[in-house]
Image (tube, grey):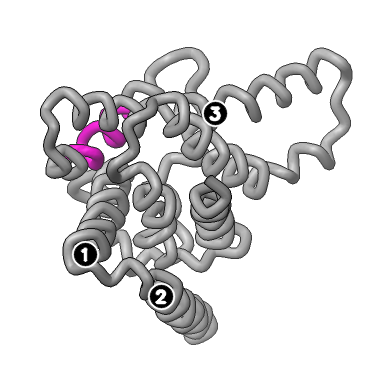
């Protein structure tokens, strides 16, 4: 139980530091792996919701804390509070849907559909009155434009699909090659790579 909570928190932290203003963008490609590792063969939708909501709530809190610095009246405060509650809820829906699909088809390969389900969620979420696209995954590559050159063909949703797909493939590599104990070392390696990419991005900006 505590291990699963810890992994969910780890995903939340990785998403925070992968997002602006910290902007260690390459971590987006592994940030969801700890959470997906917990959810991979979980059967209880209620437990899955707790872990998923926790990770996405931390992500929302860690990337939208700046709202607290604005002057808000009572109604404004209630709007912000509602947003902090609802955004992680909306983000949890595609993951919970995938778990339901996996239970029906009794196949772990259904996780490969998560990129499509997630992309569908982001698209639908951007089309209604409560749209808030700041935390749509594809926008996370914005701080490193050289990672998102294909956006001219796919839009930011293509980035969302790519990010979720790589997270799922990394998850499969852990689960199916039985090297899950090396997850910490792998994420540490990715963290070093993220710092390297960040430094390179800043270097390129300095050359302009």
The residue at the point 83 percent across, 41 percent down is: 69
The residue at the point 13 percent across, 43 percent down is: 109
Find out whether residue 31 is within the magenta segment: no
Residue that mark 1 sits on: 173
Residue that mark 3 sits on: 87
C-beta proximity under 8 Å, tags 1 and 3: no
State the CA–CA distance, disc 3 to disc 2. Answer: 27 Å
C-beta proximity under 8 Å, tags 1 and 2: no
Taking 194 as reference, is 96 above or below it? above
Find out whether residue 116 is within the magenta segment: yes
One can see residue 44 in this view: yes
Residue 161, x across and y down, in percent: 25, 46
Taking 24 as reference, is 162 above or below it? above
Camera-side residue: 188 or 197?
188
Mark sitting earlier along the chain (3/2): 3
Mark 3 Cα-neighbour bin, 10 Å: few <14, some 14–19, many ≥20: some
Residue 48, x across and y down, in percent: 42, 33
Label 3 sits on a secondary structure element that is helix
Mark 2 Cα-neighbour bin, 10 Å: few <14, some 14–19, many ≥20: some
Image mark for residue 131:
none
State the CA–CA distance, disc 1 to disc 3. Answer: 30 Å
Mark sitting earlier along the chain (1/2): 1
The residue at the point 21 percent across, 27 percent down is: 103
User: Which region is colored magenta?
Assistant: 113-123
The residue at the point 80 percent across, 22 percent down is: 77
Mark 1 Cα-neighbour bin, 10 Å: few <14, some 14–19, many ≥20: few
Horizontal side of residue 166 vs 191, given as left or right:
left
Camera-side residue: 91 or 133?
91
Residue that mark 2 sits on: 190
């Amino acid at each position: 139980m505590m291990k699963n909570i810890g992994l969910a928190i780890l995903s939340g932290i990785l998403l925070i530091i992968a997002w602006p203003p910290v902007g260690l963008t390459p971590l987006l490609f592994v940030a969801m792996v700890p959470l997906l590792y917990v959810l991979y063969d979980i059967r209880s939708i209620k437990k899955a919701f707790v872990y998923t909501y926790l990770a996405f709530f931390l992500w929302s809190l860690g990337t939208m804390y700046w709202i607290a610095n604005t002057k808000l009246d009572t109604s404004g405060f209630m709007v912000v509070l509602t947003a902090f509650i609802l955004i992680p809820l909306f983000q949890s829906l595609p993951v919970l849907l995938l778990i339901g699909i996996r239970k029906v088809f009794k196949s772990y390969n259904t996780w490969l559909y998560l990129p499509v389900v997630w992309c569908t969620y982001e698209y639908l979420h951007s089309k209604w009155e409560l749209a808030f696209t700041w935390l749509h995954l594809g926008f996370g590559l914005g701080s490193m434009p050289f990672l998102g050159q294909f956006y001219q063909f796919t839009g930011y949703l293509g980035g969302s699909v790519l990010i979720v797909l790589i997270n799922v493939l990394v998850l499969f590599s852990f689960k199916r090659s039985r090297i899950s104990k090396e997850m910490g070392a792998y994420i540490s390696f990715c963290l070093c790579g993220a710092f390297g990419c960040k430094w390179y991005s800043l270097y390129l900006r300095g050359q302009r």
